[in-house]
Amino acid sequence: MRNTAHRLRTFLPALLILCCPALAAAQSDYPGPEAFLKSVLQGEDSLSLEARGDLDGDGLADWAGVIHRRRPDSPPTYQLYVLLQARGGGYRVAEKSKEAPVAGAGCCWVEDLEIRRSSIYVQNNAKTAGTMEAATHQFKLHRGGWRLVGLRIYHTDLSADPPASTDADINLLTGSVIEKRQRGDGRPTTTRRRKRFPASFLKDFDFQNGFGTE
């Protein structure tokens, strides 16, 4: 029985690879981010932003990038991809956002992309004639899903007299909301409250500043 069990443990992984080559290949679909980009960029598409860093705690440099697509028959779009690096050095697509149209009338555009603290930080900017806003969404692999765990929104109203600003720091896991408000050169005031937020995930991200707050 012991020999039979040993042979089964040796045989089954090999059988899985032979019968399911796509499954085996999915562990490492691309030799690097450059090969991935070559496979997805078409026509006037371009890599808008990219970042590298460890996202899953294995000490390897993973990759995130925002693709800006331009097509003659539709409005331009943004899409965020996440690639995890395997021990063998290859990369696989772990998650991707919606391919979302770039809104007009000053909203919104992707300003910055970072990987730090095992998280992806995406900053979107927006402005009108009298207001400016910067929103930074923090996504992290949480309980098996790429979840929105943090959001910071800085809003300035230049049309007010004096100008007013609000800096909101939100933890979507705990529901903590810290808001700092200031008018002109006056002393800022800070308020703290809690709010229950629905779970929001990277696969649904549409690059809108208010994503995750509804």
Image: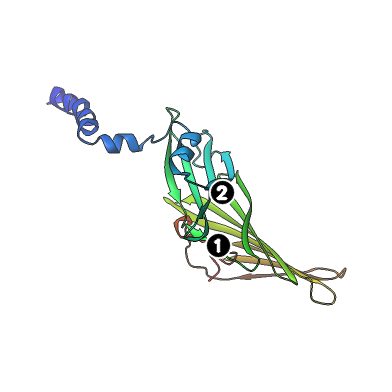
22 vs 40, nearest the viewer: 40
Q: Amino acid at mark 1?
A: Leu
Q: Nearer the viewer, residue 117 or 211?
A: 211
Q: Is residue 180 visible in this depiction of the protein?
A: no
Q: Position of residue 206 (x, y in %)?
A: 51, 61
Q: Kindly identify which residue carries mark 2.
A: 120
Whether residue 120 is visible to the viewer of this picture, yes or no, is: yes
Identity of the residue furthest to the bottom in this view: 161
> Which quadrant, please, contains the N terminus?
top left
The percent coordinates of residue 83 (x first, y second) are 47, 41
The CA span between labels 1 and 2 is 15 Å
Q: Which residue shows up at 17% across the image and 24% down it?
A: 7
Q: Residue furthest front?
A: 72
Residue at image location 47% in from the left, 55% down from the top: 97
Q: Quadrant of residue 102?
A: bottom right
- Residue name at image x 47 percent, y 57 percent: 99
Q: Nearer the viewer, residue 129 or 179?
A: 129
70, above or below 186, in the image: above
x%, y% of residue 146?
Answer: 47, 52
Identify which amino acid the numbered label 2 is placed on. Answer: Ile
Q: Is residue 42 above or below residue 78?
A: above
First in sequence: mark 1 or mark 2? 2
What residue did someone put label 1 on?
172
Vertical placement of residue 175 versus 141, above or below: below
Mark 2 residue element: strand
Q: Which mark is residue 19?
A: none
Is label 1 in a helix, a strand or a loop?
loop
Q: Residue 162 placed where, x, y %?
A: 85, 75
Q: Residues within 10 Å of mark 1 (few under 14, many from 20)?
A: many
